[in-house]
Image: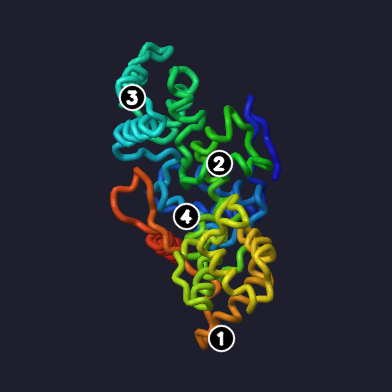
Amino acid sequence: MLLVTTGCNTVPQVPAGPARDVHAEIEQRIPAKTPDRDGWAADIQTALAAQRIEPNTENICAVLAVIEQESGYRADPPVDNLPQIARQEIRRRASAVRIPGLMVDAGLKIRALDGISYGDKLARVRTERDLSRLYEEIIDRVPMGRRLFAGKNPVQTGGAMQVGIPFAQAHAQGYPYPVQSSIRDEVFSRRGGIYFGTMHLLGYQTPYTRKVHRFADYNAGWYASRNAAFQSAVAMATGITLELDGDVLVPDAALDKPGQTERAVRSLGPQLGMDERLIRRALEQADTLAFSDSELHHRVFDLAEARAGHALPRAMIPGIRLDSPKITRELTTEWFANRVDERYRQCLAR
């Protein structure tokens, strides 16, 4: 990929030749009424090229489907009732750390450097970028701010693909654009939201044969669909009912305090020929592709299929209910994955 300097900014330059055909295909598959289709296409093309992701029709449409679902082609989409949602979150956090409501109200009456109170600023926020920047200012300047938010900005997703900001910060190496302020701010830009969203969607190898399982992983986390199928196999092999959420290992759990899936797997220990330490070591691979080829994975499926009398799926959409103050109705990972898959198929047909 070439770079061209324009003034103070260094931006990726779309190469001449065959790559222009990729740009044209991306633009053609973006809905016709979308403003600046050329700009969206350029940012998507750059994201694919910078990450060495094959710019085939399937990958292009996968990215476009997530963008359409998450933001409707808006780089920093507005959120309904965001001031009320933000106030409720502030009060919830204040209650959790025993800060009286009167102190919260007093803090929000403090005036920022521009003379406007933080309460008035809060009433004006419309997008997650607005709210993120306001939270940063409150943490820095309002006496209770750091205690209220534990020094951590509560806005954890953003941009055209609603990608996780911690994910972007952890995968910033190789980002092809100059960072003007911070990776957090880049996520709220069109180019940054697309780059990190594309990485979260397509930047890892999977054993999947259908894109719908990537869409489920986009919502639930890498390999969640593979891991939910593993949990289902464990449940079949043991007769133990498990929550098929894709979380096979409790983070940082002590060996003597396993989660429900790990406990169920341990009950198969004699049949697996594995003790609890070997099982823990194998489950620690559950956030990698290697887990699919592990002895534990193979042996659990052998036991489960012998009991079921037929082959079992190696990928399954996790059963997760979506929990966010932005969501006003009961939605699930399955709903999200199928909705994006529907948009994906429409894109393929365009």
- Seen in the picture, residue 54 relative to 231 is either above or below; the reply is above
Q: Residue at x 65, y 61 (%)?
A: 280
Q: CA distance from mark 4 to mark 3?
A: 35 Å
Residue holding disc 4: 219
Closest to the camera, between mark 3 and mark 1, is 3
Q: Disc 2 and disc 3: Cα gap in Å? A: 30 Å
Amino acid on which the number 1 mark rests in the picture:
Ala
**Could you tell me which residue is drawn at 41 percent across and 15 percent down?**
112
Q: Secondary structure at mark 1?
A: helix
Q: Which residue is mark 3?
A: 100
**10 Å neighbourhood of mark 3: few (<14), some, or many (≥20)?**
few
Residue topped by disc 1: 306
Q: Amino acid at mark 4?
A: Asn
Q: Residue at x 48, y 24 (%)?
A: 146
**Disc 4 from disc 1: Cα separation:** 32 Å
Side (left or right) of 327 relative to 315? left
Q: What colour scheme does the image use?
A: rainbow
Q: Amino acid at mark 3?
A: Pro
Please state the horizontal and vertical placement of residue 35, each as a whole percent of the image. 41, 43
Give the mark, 4 or 3, whose residue is nearer the N terminus: 3
Q: Are marks 4 and 1 in contact (CB under 8 Å)?
A: no
**188 and 145: which is toward the camera:** 145
Q: Amino acid at mark 2?
A: Pro
Residue named by callout 2 = 166
Q: Nearer the viewer, residue 267 or 72?
A: 267
Q: Nearer the viewer, mark 2 or mark 1?
A: 1
The image position of residue 141, as x and y in percent, is 47, 17
